[in-house]
Amino acid sequence: MTIDLSARRGELERLRARLAHAAEADDLGAATTELNVAAGDQHIADHASDTFDRELDESLEDNAEELIREIDEALTAIEAGTYGTCRACGGAIPEERLEAVPYATLCVEDRRKLEHG
């Protein structure tokens, strides 16, 4: 397996920056929504829509934070020389998988095992 670690690091850093920016934008949007809700006289359907949007934003922010954590772990693995090694079986994670999911820590087989119990 020949992984271009420099290119992979750059890709991970760009992805991390995009996610951090999106999470920050969601924070600003949530604050605006909260101000609108606090502004007063809203129809119940508008209030329900605002509540749904706020909950969706919080869920997306949680997902972004989890992905940022996984990206940080991948960047640490690059520095430690363990990037591309499956944490479960110790085997190599196929380059195709790392191209699709650059922050992957499990090979496809072990990921499937984890997802299916």
Image (tube, rainbow, N blue to C red):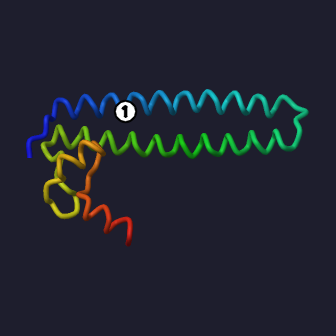
Q: Residues within 10 Å of mark 1 (few under 14, many from 20)?
A: many
In the rendered structure, the answer to whether residue 89 lies left or right of residue 103 reads left
Residue positioned most to the bottom: 117
Residue 62 image point, x, y percent: 51, 45
Based on the displayed image, in which of its 4 quarters is residue 33 positioned?
top right
Based on the displayed image, in which of its 4 quarters is residue 39 positioned?
top right
Based on the displayed image, in which of its 4 quarters is residue 18 positioned?
top left
Figure disc tally: 1
Q: Quadrant of the C terminus?
A: bottom left
Kind of residue at badge 1: Arg
Residue 108 image point, x, y percent: 26, 59
Residue 23 image point, x, y percent: 51, 33
| Residue positioned 32% across, 65% down in the render | 112
In the rendered structure, the answer to whether residue 4 lies left or right of residue 57 reads left
| Residue positioned 45% across, 31% down in the render | 20
| Residue positioned 20% across, 56% down in the render | 86
- Identify the secondary structure beneath mark 1: helix
Residue 91 image point, x, y percent: 13, 59
Residue positioned most to the left: 2
In the rendered structure, the answer to whether residue 83 lies left or right of residue 100 reads left
| Residue designated by label 1 | 16
